[in-house]
Image (spheres, coloured by chain):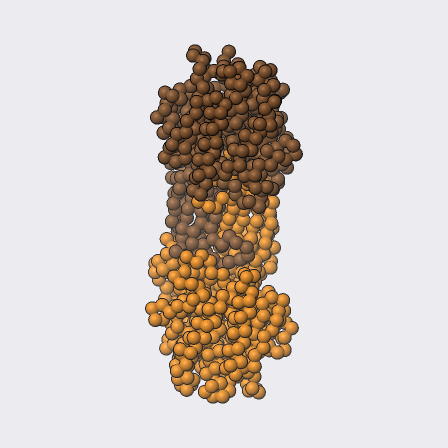
Chain colours: A orange, B brown
């Protein structure tokens, strides 16, 4: 496969320019004002797919459009569906970014810094680079390859499942290949064997019809800010376990073998918290930090709000308050069942001195991939070669709700090849990806396709 | 005193126009951009004082200026110091106002609606109306009267105590008279016998140096939003008592006699919560709503914030979170002592997985007025005559930190005659005052001065 590696090396700058161009487009899928930008990112991707030799089409959905491209010219060879997304998260506070989020910059000669560099534009392009290399150098692909690249992942992919269901014949494949996960360490080739599920809730409380003077009405009417704090605080017990009845009922404790494997991976806790700037860890008693991050379910407050939030003092009883709370679920937990239990629990705990509304922002089961498939073996070999290091198999703490969906609709498992390092800060300011990892990633994927083709 | 009442009736519209003119000035003392407006309100007040026959001067302070005016022409008669303020609170969200906050409107033929109508411009003018009537009709006042009208009350009167200390001889008086409190019900003459103290704290927590992906780092690093909720929730016990060690140590429980007096005042709880739009009450067990609002200490969350607070979902571990918490204290509680205990308690309860900072936004003791003074008796008689109803003596839930200051510096107790109804919504949108209560208030104050003069 050295001819492919050579081609990728020679086209390194051109391929990096692809990432820079695509990342310049502020394709924030959750913001109405960026609708045209999202479409532009889809059109750009479609154009690139066509340019490298794929048959590409743009499909409209009820929301943002998506790209479907394919090159299926090897009868009898296996078929793979590459999934990715070109929409991005909002940028948050601009002052936290060292440069504009959509002005890609190269830092320390190795980091591509901008929104979408890691999640997921940079990673999507790895697959297009590999396909481009095969088509340019060998004039064909070693397998049948399909690309499904959407622009609604960051808003929960509301139109993906309907599309996959409608086109299930066309999308038929042996496995799905996804690069939207992380690496264990920078430069450390990593395959993710499982992702956690996500249950995301918003508790919204309302009390008086407007803010009240707290001297006159405080300590008397139900205070939404006080009560939301109580409800949120009730969600953990003193051992830092999630305090929702039955939450752990279906959780399979990690086996001793798995715990040993996790413990064997390099991890320096002091360095970890120092890098994040956190004063310290806090999590479920009885488990290590790497275990809490991957094979144990967790609950976090993602946001809390209510009343006077600006500088200084305002003596009010707030009219309303709320909290955004999300849970990461592990395989065998049932997100829908827990969703109902969560709602019941909060309803039972909420005093009737406020009105309660619970919003759903996400409900997806965890996913576990088979670790003995020929796809896993081929990828493991290819990654180790391209990165010059033994490949790690890990469980990812984040969630990819599309994985159970692909399994259900297409009957296909997913092979997760992640190329974003642990400090990539996806969803946060100064999102970044290591360019050498993108380069090795393209080489690794080109090799993987070769091994899968036989 | 019918000649005075007659004069006030005849000049009703002119006096209402005073309020409308003064309320048109957006004298928001906390906003730098309104500095000139605050001065304008002070100048307007100074001009009115001069016009009705008082010797008036504007005094500069380190902040906004104040008005001092007097008419001390009755040797041997008692002397009273009328305190009030002509600065106002910010207006908050404009869309919650039915008309511009500084465009006074008359609603239902009886409400003057605008910022400052109740707190405190409308009430300040009651005293100037009464003085104007005496001076116009009788050519003199029955007592020696001094007016101290400042423009920094809504920012905590930072320059009032220095001014009073500096001019303590000039401000010497038998009692202070203040109209900056409320009425028990619209049209129900009310004297406030005590106000609660205020202890206002802000708990600020910081964790990781920026927001983190909650799938990767959730359940692992200390989450400031989770922990602020726990700290806030810890501040009440299950009986809704304030859960700070020693908080109730110095609280004198209300006597049976006082509880009977409070219970005798008309109060319809269902109507109360319905008017506020609140689904229900929630407060310290063992006490009624009127007791909780006046003679018991309380703790309220005035604001809580952290992480992602906008619409929809964002899966982060917030970098920071905080809560604004204020306590209303009753006589005999020591605000400074409790301030130290609060800080100690929060420090002890806060896990070291986050950094903690505690800000102070207010620290003032409660105040109790003597209920058997001749001032109280005179005012009670005058109010009952002017309103045609028995006068209620109440304890106010809010705080007036200047009262203990007047007591300390001038040795003078304060007589609190309040004319803003319970739905006046001071500090909130559509602040309003009942014009008939302003009118009866002026009549009541004119009578009070007469009885005090003998």
Q: Position of residue B427 (x, y in %)?
A: 52, 37
Q: Is residue A315 above or below residue B368?
A: below
Q: Is residue A186 left or right of residue B431?
A: left
Q: Position of residue B22 (x, y in %)?
A: 52, 33
Name the quarter where the N terminus of chain A is drawn.
bottom left
Q: Residue at x 45, y 87 (%)?
A: A137
Q: Is residue A154 above or below residue B123?
A: below
Q: Is residue A122 above or below residue B403?
A: below
Q: Residue at x 52, y 74 (%)?
A: A44
Q: Position of residue A313 (x, y in %)?
A: 45, 40
Quarter-of-image position of residue A42: bottom right
Q: Nearer the viewer, residue B444 or A388?
A: B444
Q: Position of residue A129 (x, y in %)?
A: 46, 79
Quarter-of-image position of residue B437: top right
Q: Residue at x 60, y 47 (%)?
A: A356
Q: How many marks?
A: 0
Q: Residue at x 57, y 76 (%)?
A: A68
Q: Is residue B77 visible?
A: yes
Q: Is residue B336 visible?
A: no
Q: Nearer the viewer, residue A290 or A216?
A: A216
Q: Is residue A343 above or below residue B338?
A: below
Q: Nearer the viewer, residue A62 or B85?
A: B85
């Amino acid at each position: 496969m050295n001819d492919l590696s050579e081609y990728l090396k020679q086209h390194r700058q051109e391929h990096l320019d692809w990432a820079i161009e695509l990342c310049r487009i502020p394709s924030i899928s959750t913001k109405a004002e960026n609708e045209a930008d999202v479409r532009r990112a889809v059109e750009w991707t479609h154009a690139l797919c066509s340019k490298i030799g794929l048959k590409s089409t743009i499909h409209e959905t009820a929301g943002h459009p998506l790209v479907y491209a394919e090159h299926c010219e090897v009868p009898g060879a296996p078929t793979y569906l590459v999934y990715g997304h070109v929409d991005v998260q909002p940028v948050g506070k601009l002052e936290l970014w060292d440069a504009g989020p959509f002005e890609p910059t190269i830092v320390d000669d190795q980091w591509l810094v901008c929104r979408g560099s890691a999640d997921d534009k940079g990673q999507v392009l790895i697959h297009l680079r590999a396909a481009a290399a095969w088509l340019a150098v060998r004039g064909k692909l070693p397998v049948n390859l399909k690309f499904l690249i959407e622009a609604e992942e960051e808003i929960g992919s509301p139109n993906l499942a309907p599309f996959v269901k409608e086109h299930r014949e066309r999308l038929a494949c042996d496995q799905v290949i996804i690069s939207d996960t992380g690496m264990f360490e920078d430069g450390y080739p990593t395959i993710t064997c499982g992702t956690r599920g996500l249950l995301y809730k918003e508790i919204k409380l309302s009390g008086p019809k407007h803010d009240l003077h707290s001297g006159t009405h405080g300590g008397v009417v139900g205070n939404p800010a006080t009560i939301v704090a109580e409800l949120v605080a009730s969600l953990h017990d003193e051992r830092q376990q999630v305090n929702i009845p039955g939450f752990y009922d279906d959780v399979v404790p990690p086996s001793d073998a798995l715990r040993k494997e996790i413990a064997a991976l390099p991890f320096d806790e002091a360095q970890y918290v120092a890098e994040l700037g956190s004063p310290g860890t806090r999590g479920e008693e009885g488990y290590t930090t790497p275990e809490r991050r991957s094979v144990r379910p967790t609950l976090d407050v993602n946001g809390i709000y209510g009343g006077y939030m600006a500088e200084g003092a305002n003596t009010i009883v707030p009219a309303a308050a709320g909290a955004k709370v999300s849970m990461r679920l592990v395989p065998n937990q049932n997100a829908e069942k827990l969703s109902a239990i969560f709602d019941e629990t909060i309803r039972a705990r909420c005093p009737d001195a406020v009105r309660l509304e619970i919003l759903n922002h996400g409900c997806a089961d965890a996913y576990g991939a088979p670790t003995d498939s020929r796809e896993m073996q081929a990828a493991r070999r290819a990654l180790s070669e391209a990165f010059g290091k033994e490949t790690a198999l890990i469980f990812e703490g984040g969630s990819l709700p599309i994985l159970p969906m692909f399994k259900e609709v297409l009957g296909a498992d997913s092979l997760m090849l992640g190329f974003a390092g642990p400090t990539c800060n996806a969803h946060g300011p100064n999102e970044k990806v290591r360019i050498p990892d993108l380069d090795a990633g393209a080489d690794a994927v080109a090799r993987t396709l070769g091994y899968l083709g036989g």
